[in-house]
Amino acid sequence: MATRPLSTTVSRYQRLNLSRRRGNAVRQSLAAAGVIESVTIVTRSGQVVLYQLTEFGRTVCSAAGVELKSRPRESLEHSFWVNRTAEYFEKKGFEITREHVIKGNGAIDLLAVRSGESVAIEVETGKSDIKANLSHIKRCGFDKMILVATSPAAVSACQKAIESVGDSSSGTIKLLTWLDIS
């Protein structure tokens, strides 16, 4: 979980050569001790449950000599949907760059390029300043911008932000949802 937070339970158990019974016992023990916590992500076909280290878990790992990356800037849910979105656009023939730096001291989640068309893609959980992000990205000269909303609340927030930056009819900003890409 420290090095592969987006790994599913099944793939983690296979990689670690654990039976379901033993893997579940270890996972439940770590959760009960407050070392890990679950993050449930709703998808089109149901849900995915991922696990991440708690602050206590990060402390335990550090004390045990496990090398950790710095605390992620984004939530596990956001990381999950950025990965899913990248896969979705790669299947559509786009070349993807993650965390593409843009002018004005920032970065977009994904840059998708195909046939000379550049598309800025932002995954929105509804917890950021979507309007400010859109305004900033809009000035960077991308051919299109796509917001991927990860929940009904994020859809509403994205719709309001699109309307507030005055792009609800021009079509340069498109809204997709988790249902579109999962």
Image: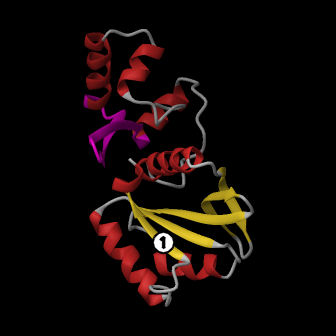
Q: Of residues 62 and 19, which is closer to you in this image?
A: 19
Magenta stretch?
32-55
Q: Quadrant of residue 25?
A: top left
**From what the image shows, is residue 67 above or below residue 15?**
below
Q: Of residues 113 and 131, which is closer to you in this image?
A: 113
**From what the image shows, is residue 71 above or below residue 68?**
below
Q: What count of labels does the image hold?
A: 1
Q: Would you name the residue on which mark 1 appears?
A: 174
Magenta span has 74?
no
**From what the image shows, is residue 55 above or below residue 176?**
above
Give the main secondary structure, helix, strand or loop, of the magenta stretch.
strand
Q: Quadrant of residue 106?
A: bottom right
Magenta span has 34?
yes
Q: Of residues 89 and 43, which is closer to you in this image?
A: 89
Q: Which residue occupies 42% across, 37% down? A: 53
Q: Which residue occupies 56% across, 63% down? A: 121
Q: Is residue 68 left or right of residue 149?
A: right
Determine whether the residue tagged by mark 1 lies in a helix, strand or loop. strand
Q: Which residue occupies 67% across, 82% down? A: 139
Q: Which residue occupies 47% across, 36% down? A: 5
* Amino acid at the residue labelled 1: Lys
Q: Is residue 2 left or right of residue 40?
A: right
Pinpoint residue 46: horizontal percent, then vertical percent: 24, 42
Q: Quadrant of residue 70?
A: top right
